[in-house]
Image (tube, helix red, strand yellow):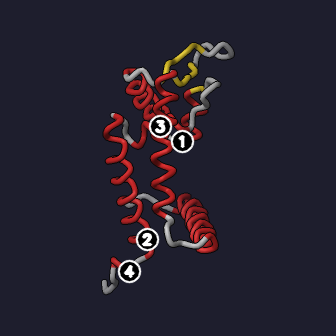
Amino acid sequence: MNCDHNKSLGRLIYLTAQDMKNHAEKSLKPYDLTLEQFHLLKHMSPDAAISQRELGELVNKTPANITRILDRLAAKNLVVRRNNPEDRRSSQVVLTERGLELVREVFTIFESFSAQLTHGITEQEQQNIIAALNRIGQNIKMLSPKIQPLL
């Protein structure tokens, strides 16, 4: 194959995403949080419980992954689980006061990071990038059902 992988759009998106993830993980380390954990916390309402299933759908995680992440967050006293009054088979998750304070503090850091990422990129350029990435995401979803396992 004669293609320059460093100039491929897919490769550039992958490398940029890796750099962003690595920076985010380093930023979260002093707070004893992983990116996965913070992603869950920031999707929780500060004043309302959410079912584990709903939370999993919001962050695109499997029930097993949600359970694992929530176990770790509960051990850090950032969330608590409650019985779901509407469905005894499920539980609801609520941010603790400590969890809410942490989300607010860390969210500020990520807002600053986001502003730094887009420094020097015009609003129109940002909108074009967003549109292109959304189109790529749609294309990926259309490809997924076509993937056949190799035998």
User: Helix, strand or loop at disc 4?
Assistant: helix
Q: Residue furthest bottom?
A: 2
User: Could you say where residue 1 lies in the image, as x and y percent from the top left?
Assistant: 31, 83
Q: Quadrant of residue 78?
A: top left
Residue behind mark 1: 59
Residue 105 got which mark?
3
Q: Of the residues shown, which amino acid type is indicated by label 1? A: Val
Is 103 situated left or right of 18 in this image? right
> From the viewer's perspective, is 130 left or right of 120?
right
Question: Pointer 4 and pointer 2: residues touching (CB < 8 Å)?
Answer: no
Query: Residue 86 occupies which quadrant of the picture?
Result: top right
**Mark before the other along the chain sequence, 3 or 2:** 2
Q: For the residues marked 4 and 1, what is the alpha-carbon distance in whole angstroms?
A: 31 Å
**In whole angstroms, how far apart are the C-alphas of marks 3 and 2?**
33 Å
Q: Residue furthest right?
A: 86
From the image, tell me which residue sits under label 4. Answer: 7
Three-letter code, disc 3: Glu
Q: Is residue 151 visible?
A: no
Could you tell me which quadrant the C terminus lies in?
bottom left
Residues at marks 1 and 2 touching, judged by CB atoms closer than 8 Å: no
CA neighbours of label 2 inside 10 A, class few (<14), some (14 to 19), many (20+): few
Q: Which residue is found at the position 34% from the left and 84% from the top?
A: 3
Q: Quadrant of residue 139?
A: bottom right
Q: Which residue is mark 2?
A: 10
Which residue is drawn at the image coordinates 51% and 59% (left, top)? 115
- The mark nearer the N terminus, 3 or 1, is 1
- Decide if residue 68 is in sight here: yes
